[in-house]
Amino acid sequence: MDYTRREFIGMVSAAAALTGVACGAEESGGSADALAGDDPLGVRPDFPVVSEGVYLNSPYITPSPRQAIEAAQAFLEAKARDPISLGNMLGETTAARQKYAQLIGASEAEVSMLFATSDGENVVTRALDLKQGDNVVIDDLHYTTTYVLYSHLRKTRGIDLRIVKNKDGAATPEAFAELVDDRTRLISVSWISHVNGYHHDLKALADLAHAHNAYLYADSIQGTGVVTLDARATGIDFFTSGTYKWLLGGYGVAPFYVREELMDLITPDRLGGLSVANELENHEFELHSDARKHIYATLGFGSVFQLSAALDYLLKVGVENIERHTVALAHRIHQGLTDQGYRVNTPAGNRSAIVAFWHDKEVEKVKTAMEAARIKFSFREDNTQIRVGPALFNNGSEIDRFLEVTGSLA
């Protein structure tokens, strides 16, 4: 038979009951962290990663909670025993779009599903039909995809690519304003930079873009799920986020936001069976006119179910609570590293969970020390920098352990 959404959720719940999975600190029945009061958000029992050591590598890949993994596992189990119908899979896609819209302060009609973060910027730039004489303004804290895309458009379309140079780890709206003019078509930023966690002021950048009849695009993969966002209030025009980082999901699905007033402007770059809203006579079709028009073919539905459960989790915990907790831990790391004499690449007081710093040590010595303390992190910039990022499941004692190691290396 086909599973309804309610039946599917029931199957997930049953799987949780059979495996004895905790559904929160209040149900953990004696979590050491909960008893010690070192689990401020009451989430650590839901994250198996906490038993593996100190995981501070969430800017790279954020571990999923058990509930999201169970949803993906239940989907696969159904695929093996009694596959879920396309209609029900599309129904779950709609549910995930609704939850994501709630998370970012948007409407369901403004949220689509793509396959990866980079899809969104490709869709937007194709729709804008950039030409010779147009310019795009980005900064040097962006992700590689953006440089590849606009370098190609510079060669093939003759656009002018302007790059803001960060100063002390920050690329301010004032710095962007120096490069924006009336030939600017688009400003593009990584909302939270993967380089150092710098938090761009989206409202100021949107105002700057709109003052010149341009648009603002953001890669939001390092922000959504860990930093609060009201898309409508910021005035941002478009953004995309893969889900394997702070959204606690998997791979192959990426929510794509287009501001409602610009929906007609951003035309889909490809079409397929799922583009159809209504089938007419003689092989004619009425296509979706809202953000669904960008969903043209079969999605990675296992990841959709995983994302839907992850969004439930985030909405329950509250992104505002996650932001408050993780940013406080990041500030604690920043201060500790500064006190130890490290040069930190993240601006002081920055509002994100990411901290990057130069270590000036032998790489193998750093690896050995971190591995001995069971700490996961990322080397960056040809191993000259270390990047860490506390997530909702991290706590103060783990930050202390990390700073003990960096202190021993200082």
Image (cartoon, helix red, strand yellow):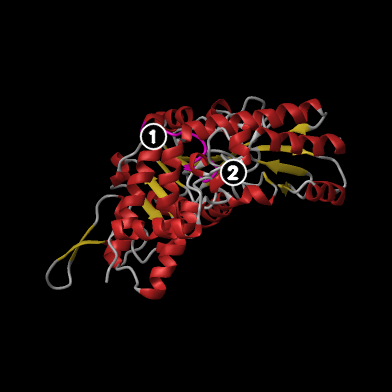
- Name the foreground residue: 353 vs 398: 398
Amino acid under disc 2: His
**Percent position of residue 29, x then y:** 54, 43
**Nearer the observer, 149 or 154:** 149
Kindly identify which numbered label has been placed on residue 142: 2
* Residue located 32% across and 64% down the image: 271
Secondary structure beneath disc 1? Answer: loop
Q: Secondary structure at mark 2?
A: loop
- The residues colored magenta run 218-232
Which residue ends up furthest to the front in the rendered image? Answer: 29
Q: Position of residue 199 (x, y in %)?
A: 56, 33
Please name the predominant secondary structure of the magenta segment in the image: loop
Q: Dot 1 surroundings within 10 Å: few (below 14), some, or many (20 or more)?
A: some
Q: Nearer the viewer, residue 189 or 252?
A: 252
Q: Position of residue 53 (x, y in %)?
A: 70, 48
Residue beneath label 1, please? Answer: 213
Q: For the residue marked with disc 1, what is the amino acid?
A: Asn
